[in-house]
Image (spheres, rainbow, N blue to C red):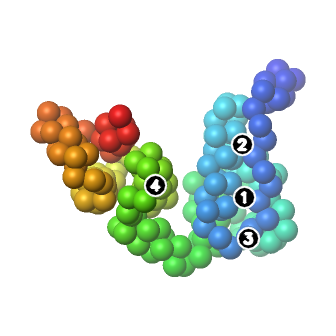
Amino acid sequence: MTVLLLHAHKFPHPERFSGFHDGFPCLTWLQSVRFYIKAIKFPHSEWTRIAVSYLTSAAILWWQSCGIKASGEFEIFEAGLRTMFLPESFLDAVRVQLYSARFTTSVPALIEEMRLCMDILHPNPSVDTRKELELAATSILLSALPAGLQEMLQAFLIANPDPTWNKFCDAAIR
C-alpha cells in the first residue's frame, strides 16, 4: 500500500464535487476522477469508494441516500450521479450546440468545441451509434468551414473513405 500511495503523489487529485446541477462541472469531475483512478491503477473494485471520497455537500448527501454501495460497480455510481446532477435539458442543449456549430474564430477552436460536444453526447467511441453521430458531425463541420478548406477536406475524404472523427478533425486542423 505504501508504494501505491507514493505513486499517487505523481498525479493531481481530482477536485471535490459538491453536486452543483450543471452538466459541464459534473462531466469534468467524472472525467478527472476516471483519469486519476486509472493513472494510479486502483483496482476496479475500489473505483466507487475512491470517487465517493471526493464528494462534498449535496453530492455526498445524495450518495448517502441513493443506496449505491461504496464497493459497488463504478458504472452504476456514475450513471446515478449523472441522473442526479446533469440537468434534464443539458444533453439537448449540447446537441443543439453541436448541430449549430459555426466557424467564428479559428478551425482549431471550432473543432475543440465540436469534439467536446461529441464526447459529452457519446463518450464511448466503440459503439455503432457513435459512428452515426460522427457522420453527422463531419457534415456539420464541412458546412461550417470556408469553401477552400471544404474542398481540401472533401479530397481527404475521397482519399480516406472511412476516417475516424479524430483523424478527420486532425486533417482539418492541418
Q: How crowded is mark 1: few (under 14 residues within 10 Å), some or many (20 or more)?
A: some
Q: Do the residues labelled 4 and 3 touch (CB within 8 Å)?
A: no
- Foreground tag (3 vs 2): 3
Circle 1: residue type: Lys
**Gap in angstroms between the C-alphas marked 4 and 3:** 31 Å
- On screen, residue 51 above or below 76: above
Residue 69, located in which quarter of the rendered image?
Answer: bottom right
The numbered mark at residue 15 is none
Q: Which comes sooner in the sequence, label 4 or label 2? A: 2
- On screen, residue 22 above or below 109: below
In percent of width and height, residue 17 lies at 77, 59
Q: What element carries label 1?
A: loop
Residue 108 left/right relative to 150: right
Residue 163, located in which quarter of the rendered image?
Answer: top left
- On screen, residue 84 above or below 11: below
Name the residue carrying label 4.
105
Front position in the image: 171 or 78: 171
Q: What element carries label 4?
A: loop
| Viewer can see residue 162 | no
- On screen, residue 28 above or below 3: below
Q: Which comes sooner in the sequence, label 1 or label 4? A: 1
Circle 2: residue type: Glu
The numbered mark at residue 46 is 2
**Gap in angstroms between the C-alphas marked 4 and 2:** 44 Å
Q: What element carries label 3?
A: loop
Residue 170, located in which quarter of the rendered image?
Answer: top left
The numbered mark at residue 20 is 3
Residue 104 left/right relative to 44: left
